[in-house]
Amino acid sequence: MIGSTIETCTQTTPRVSIGLPVFNGEKFLEQSITSILAQTFADFEFIISDNGSVDRTETICRSYAARDPRIRYLRQERNRGAAWNHNFVFECSRGEYFKWQCHDDLCEPTFVEKCVAVLDREPAIVLCYSQFARIDENSELVPATSAGWAPIASSSVSGIESPHERFQALIHRRDACEEIYGLMRARAARETRLVGAYAQSDDNFLAELALRGGFYEIPEPLFRYRLHPENSTKTHSTRLERLLWFDPNGRRRFYIPFLRQFREYLLLIRRAPVSRRERIHCYLHTLGWAWRFRAWLAEDLHEGIFLGLLVPFLKKHAIWTRAAWRTLKRLMHSRRVVS
């Protein structure tokens, strides 16, 4: 359990639990809540955890909660990070199936109904999601191709039966992971470490879930992913900003997210309920992943060790290096201007 606040959670047992973690989400929050309340599948609880917002988020949530008894609004005294808040709404859930909902995304009215039908019909499936469409700030469709709008397949994981092949397909991607906003079996998710307090931990969660069952993609764009200037990947673009978004307590200079993610892949493989043969394949895929994205490691070593440790040490303890460092920064700046 994630904290004593969970004791306030309801004891009812709906079929589906939907958790919406939010922090300062007033701009799109009402549209997101409305899209959930409009679902044709009505047997759900809707858990909203406000991470200490200072905008109109609290007012909006309390207004909706007063009108619909399925909504439980839980407000935190301070921002405890995106990872904590995602895990909190899951730990509060009581449903057989669970879905995370982002405060700025939308679901078509039949999203939950069609995902439930798949999970009821296919016991080997642990996560069901749909194709998605991208929308802008005004909820207008964003063209996916030069020819115009088209639904986007979330991934190539759907339909793969082998655990190690699902694992490989997931970790070798380099894009968004919209599958995490699908409907999952709560039982399978509870066997994982959920969302870790480090960058890219949503990728690790999906990889761990994939080692416990199959994924299924509904061939309809029932999920709408919003692109806007306040997206977390845009407002938290640096490695340290991403860390602090997941975990506000993670204030440190020396941080190498690539090695952290590599370590977490190894750990989740070790605890996965798979055969030795599958486990060996997964370890080999992880080595292949490390080699393919070795440029990440080079960037992390440069940012974490050189800029995070070595340069501050020299600037503080070796006065003669300060002039050289200023010259290097001017050269780097001039190169960026020229390019």
Image (cartoon, rainbow, N blue to C red):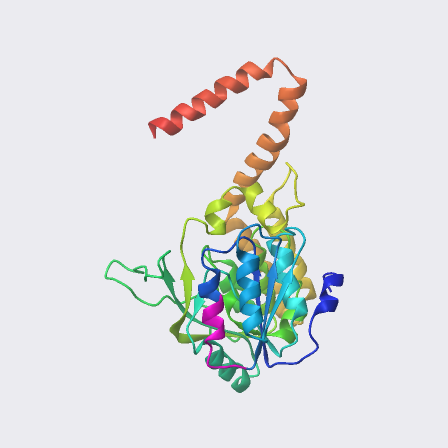
Residue 205: x percent and y percent? 59, 62
Residue in the image at 48% along x and 23% along y: 329
Residue furthest out toward the bottom: 121
Is 123 left, or right, of 151 in this rendering? right
Q: Is residue 58 magenta?
A: no
Q: Count the numbered circles shown.
A: 0
Q: Is residue 139 left or right of residue 216?
A: left
The residue that appears at 52% across and 41% down in the rendered structure is 238
**Quadrant that contains the N terminus:** bottom right
Q: Quadrant of residue 93?
A: bottom right
Query: Against 124, is 102 above or below?
Result: above
- Is 34 within the magenta? yes
With respect to residue 290, does 330 lie above or below? above
Q: Is residue 252 visible?
A: yes
Magenta segment range? 33-42
Q: Quadrant of the C terminus?
A: top left
Residue lying furthest left in this view?
147
**Residue 99 seen by the camera:** no
Q: Position of residue 91 (x, y in %)?
A: 67, 67
Q: Position of residue 224 (x, y in %)?
A: 41, 65
Which residue corresponds to the image point at 67% horizontal and 71% vertical from the top-left?
273
Q: Which residue lies at the image location 57% right of the left edge and 70% below the top edge?
A: 66
**Percent position (x, y) of residue 44?**
57, 78
Left or right placement of residue 27 versus residue 322 in this view: left
Asked whether 199 or 166 is in front, the reply is: 199
